[in-house]
Amino acid sequence: MRSDLFKTEYQAQAATASGMSLQHSKAIRYVVNGECHARQGSMVAYRGNLQFEVKSQGVGNFLKRAVTGEGLSLMAVRGQGEVWFAHNAQSCFVIELEPQDALTINGRNVLCFDPTLSYDIKMVSGAGMAGGGLFNCQFAGQGRIGLISDGEPIVIPVTSQAPVYVDTDAVVGWTSHLRTSLHRGQSLKSMLRGGSGEAFQLMLQGDGFVVVQPSEQQPPAEK
C-alpha cells in the first residue's frame, strides 16, 4: 500500500524515554511511567496498560472553579504506556519549567502537564472583571506543560521600559512575576458613541514575556 499518509513524520515511533514531547504541531505524545495529568476528553489514542480517571484538584481549587468559572476539568492518566493528546486540531507547544519559574496560563489553553508541577487558581492582580476573567491558572515547579493555541501564537517580550497590552480574550499566558492591571484603550466619548470594540486591555509590566493567540473567539465547550 502506498500513500503520503505513511511518511515518517506521521508515524508513531517506538518510545525512547518517558515524558512529554511533540508528536507534531497538532498533538502531544506522553510516554507514561506512573502518572500524568491532562484536560478531560483530550486523549485521541493510546497503547499500553493505562487507566483514565477524574483528577481531584482539592477543595480549594474546586471552590474557586465553582465561584469563578476558571480552571479546567482534569484527568489523571496512570500506568505504563503511551498516550496522545490533542484538542480541536489546535497548535500544540511544550514548555519546560525550572524550579524558579512560574507561569500563569488561561485554563482553556492547558492540554497536559507533569505531576511534578504545582497547580493553583490565582487572582489576576489589578485586572478587575475583565473579559478573560479575574482568575487564571498558575503553574510552578520543575516539569513540562503542554499548551494549545488557536492558531500560531505570538510571544511578546515584556520589559520594564515597555509594557505590553493584550486582549483578555486572546491572551494565552505570561510569566507570573509580571505586574498586571486593567487599561482603558479608548476615551469615554468613544465608548458613548458605540465603542471601538477595544475598550479594555490587560497591561503587563516588568521583565518577562506574554503569549497571545490570533483569535478572540470564546473557547468551544470541553468534551
Image (spheres, rainbow, N blue to C red):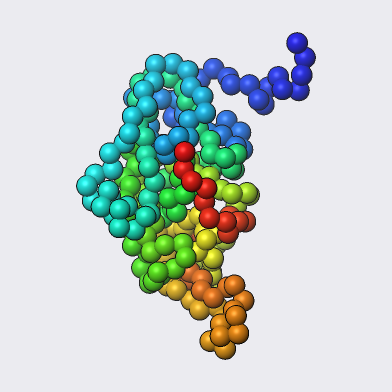
Rendered location of residue 164, percent (x, y): 53, 69
Please report the residue visible at 51 percent of the width from the left and 41 percent of the height from the top: 94
Please report the residue visible at 39 percent of the width from the left and 46 percent of the height from the top: 72
| Residue 170 versus residue 28 in the image, above or below | below
Q: Is any atom of residue 212 visible in this view?
A: no
**Is residue 88 toward the left or the right of residue 6 in the image?**
left
Q: Given the current orientation, which residue lies at the most extreme bottom position?
A: 189
Q: Is any atom of residue 66 visible in this view?
A: yes
Nearer the observer, 39 or 12: 39
| Residue 188 versus residue 139 in the image, above or below | below
Please report the residue visible at 60 percent of the width from the left and 85 percent of the height from the top: 193
Rendered location of residue 204, percent (x, y): 47, 68
Please report the residue visible at 45 percent of the width from the left and 54 percent of the height from the top: 106
Rendered location of residue 54, percent (x, y): 33, 34
Q: Identify the image quadrant of residue 145.
A: top left
| Residue 134 versus residue 182 in the image, above or below | above
Rendered location of residue 169, percent (x, y): 52, 61
**Is residue 11 toward the left or the right of residue 65 in the image?**
right
Image quarter where the N terminus lies is: top right
